[in-house]
Image (tube, rainbow, N blue to C red):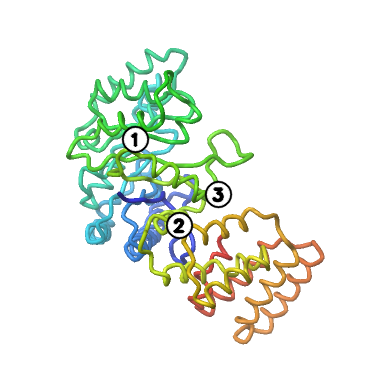
Amino acid sequence: MSIGYACLLIGQVNASLSSCRIKYASFENIRRISSANLSALKSMIDYNRQEKIHLFRISSDIIPFASHQQVNFPWQEEFGEALAGIGDKIKEGNLRVSMHPGQYTILNSPHPQVVHNAVADLKYHAEFLDALAAGPESKIILHLGGIYGDKKRAIRSFKENYLRLPEKIKRRLALENDDSNYNLEEVLIISRDLGIPVVFDHLHHQLNPSPGSMDVYEWIHLCCRTWGKSDGKPKIHYSQGRSGGSHGAHSNSIKAREFLDFYYSLPDKNIDIMLEVKDKNLSVIKCINILDPNLPIDRLKREWTRYQYLILSQSAGKYKEIKEIFKQNKGIEALSFYDKIDMVRELPEDREQQVIAAQLIWSKLKLDCSLGEKKRYQKLLQGYIEGKVSISSLKRHLFKSARKQNNTDMLKSYYFYL
């Protein structure tokens, strides 16, 4: 089993993706942005290999407007060598990758132009994965689409348009149940008719359940049976709803105990689990660590060095408690550690603690700062104390100073990213 995350990497510099608007989509801009995005993707792959994360969804936006009929940027010709190099890293790291087109890639639309655009977008995704030399287990995940006032007709349209797709697209497609239109029962019927594997989405099933008395794990079992040998291990999407969030909104972080309850109830652990969560790789590392019965204490210590300033900025008590545990080399279970972290992350902003954390970080940076940077810090700090400046503005200044100094330890701190 592998646990992975989608598209974006948190806590690492030089791993951010860029985009542009269509009116600025000149050849030069697309080439520049695509080159930077491929460099960021390379950093993500390197990070995943280092952290032994073997499941990753690649953003559809690596090459901006790749399937847009007005752009026609020859990305395969421009970046073939770079893509092959990234593909080699993926293979060497035993990494399974996937892609997930956006909400406008609708194969069953009643409008021919929308369908034409969807096919072009699916073609781009398939060719991108082919350029990486990714195997057939690297899937393109797709929702069925809309209902358009007649669900039976919409399903027929999907089937008809699917059968017209080039083979290089069909061999990569996997279907996913959604949170409002098509439940698992409907998706599984289409899967049976067309021979497409189904990705079980945990949160979508909660929001849009199928009729009947089967429990979650029986539905997962049925989805797993749709995966053939060449498709690789069955894959599911796991997420937890955000408290107070909009319909279908993902939580900021995966609650460790809730995830464990789900995981240990799985009848078959030979599946891959893609976490859909706001803090991306941070929740993946958490879940990997709590499942490891032989987790080295050094791995938790490394996690603590990344979390410590964030925890200090929220709770002096928990900061001292966790610091003392590691200082005295007391045994600490990963689950207990993340329980403390998760509890603090849910606390409201503590202005006094934020000032203490900012001052401690500044003490490690100020010696190498210019007079202008020092004045700027003092102005922002005073503004925050007086309630005139947000903590994010103060954090941005500290981060900028750390990046200018190439303070790698500080730049890895989750304080700047959460």
- Tell me the residue at 32%/63% (across/down): 49
Tell me which numbered mark, 3 or 1, is placed earlier along the sequence. 1
Tag shown at residue 286:
2
What element does badge 2 sit on? helix
| Residue assigned mark 1 | 199
CA distance separating discs 1 and 2: 23 Å
Tag shown at residue 250:
none
| 48 over 99 or under it: above or below | below
- Tell me the residue at 64%/67% (across/down): 395
Tell me which numbered mark, 2 or 3, is placed earlier along the sequence. 3
User: Few, some or many C-alpha atoms within 10 Å of disc 1 (few <14, some 14-19, many ≥20)?
Assistant: many
CA distance separating discs 2 and 3: 13 Å
User: Few, some or many C-alpha atoms within 10 Å of disc 3 (few <14, some 14-19, many ≥20)?
Assistant: many
CA distance separating discs 3 and 1: 22 Å
Report if the CB atoms under discs 3 and 1 are less than 8 Å apart: no
The quarter of the picture where residue 340 lies is: bottom right
Report if the CB atoms under discs 1 and 2 are less than 8 Å apart: no
Residue 177 location, x and y as percent? 40, 29
Disc nearest the viewer among 1 and 2: 2
What element does badge 1 sit on? strand
Tag shown at residue 252:
3
What element does badge 3 sit on? loop
Residue 251 in sight in this render:
yes
Q: Which amino acid type corresponds to the residue marked 2 in the rendered image?
A: Lys
Q: Which amino acid type corresponds to the residue marked 3 in the rendered image?
A: Asn
Asked whether 64 or 409 is in front, the reply is 409
Asked whether 186 or 270 is in front, the reply is 270
Q: Which amino acid type corresponds to the residue marked 1 in the rendered image?
A: Val
Disc nearest the viewer among 2 and 3: 2
